[in-house]
Image (tube, grey):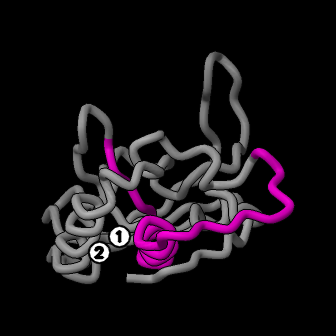
Amino acid sequence: MNSRFNDENLRLTHFETEVHVSCPKCAKKAIATVDYEKKEARLYCLFCGYNKTTDTELSYFGLSGNFKVAASSYFDVGLWYAVPFKGDYFIAYNEKHLDYLEQYISAKLREHKDRSHFTLLEKLPKFYHEAKNRKALLEIIKKLRLKK
């Protein structure tokens, strides 16, 4: 268990261009990616070969445009790293996101410098921060790493 965590002030957007999802064809791990400059999103599965490409135009609340959202949002798929936890969900977009959350959750001392009020850690639901949930959350992370 790590004793100290230094917040890198990362935002959720840091992890959103590559999101691991459930393949809509075989239900195994697939990867959704997005290139905002090309306005293109792609979903591909290394297991069954499923492959889909789409543009990034979405409609939200009657507004249409090329919004910068998580790569998975362009496809009707579930996150690979998502588990119910105490009436909420523990989620991670990919392994790097999972690593970052694990480092934070496992640390007994969490240092935050120059926070901007928009960082990933500041936006997390309360249960991620509570020491009483540390053991259960670390067990979830361990199981998610083994998920095939």
Q: Are marks 1 and 2 in contact (CB under 8 Å)?
A: yes
Q: Residue visible at 27% across and 82% down?
A: 46
Q: Residue visible at 69% across and 50% down?
A: 68
Whether residue 141 appears in magenta in the rendering, the answer is no
Number of marks drawn: 2
Q: Amino acid at mark 1?
A: Asn
Q: Residue visible at 39% across and 55% down?
A: 131
Tell me if 24 is positioned left or right of 54 in this view. left
Name the spot of residue 86 as percent of width and height, x first: 24, 37
Q: Which element type, helix, strand or loop, lies under badge 1?
A: strand
Quadrant where the C terminus is found in the figure: bottom left
Q: Amino acid at mark 2?
A: Cys
Disc number at residue 45? 2
Tell me if 134 is positioned left or right of 36 in this view. left
Q: For mark 1, does the 10 Å Cα neighbourhood hold few (<14), some (14 to 19), or many (20 or more) residues?
A: some
Q: Distance between the Cα atoms at labels 1 and 2? A: 7 Å
Mark closest to the chain's N terminus, 1 or 2: 2
* Front-lying residue, 62 or 148: 148
Name the spot of residue 33 as percent of width and height, x first: 52, 68
Quadrant where the N terminus is found in the figure: bottom left
Q: For mark 2, does the 10 Å Cα neighbourhood hold few (<14), some (14 to 19), or many (20 or more) residues?
A: many
Placement of 35 over or under 4, stated as above or below: above
Disc number at residue 51? 1
Name the spot of residue 111 as percent of width and height, x first: 68, 68
Q: Which residues are magenta?
A: 89-117
Tell me if 42 is positioned left or right of 62 in this view. left
Placement of 122 over or under 59, stated as above or below: below
On the question of residue 124 being in view, the answer is: yes
To which quarter of the image does residue 105 belong? bottom left
Q: Which element type, helix, strand or loop, lies under badge 2?
A: strand
Name the spot of residue 143 as percent of width and height, x first: 17, 71
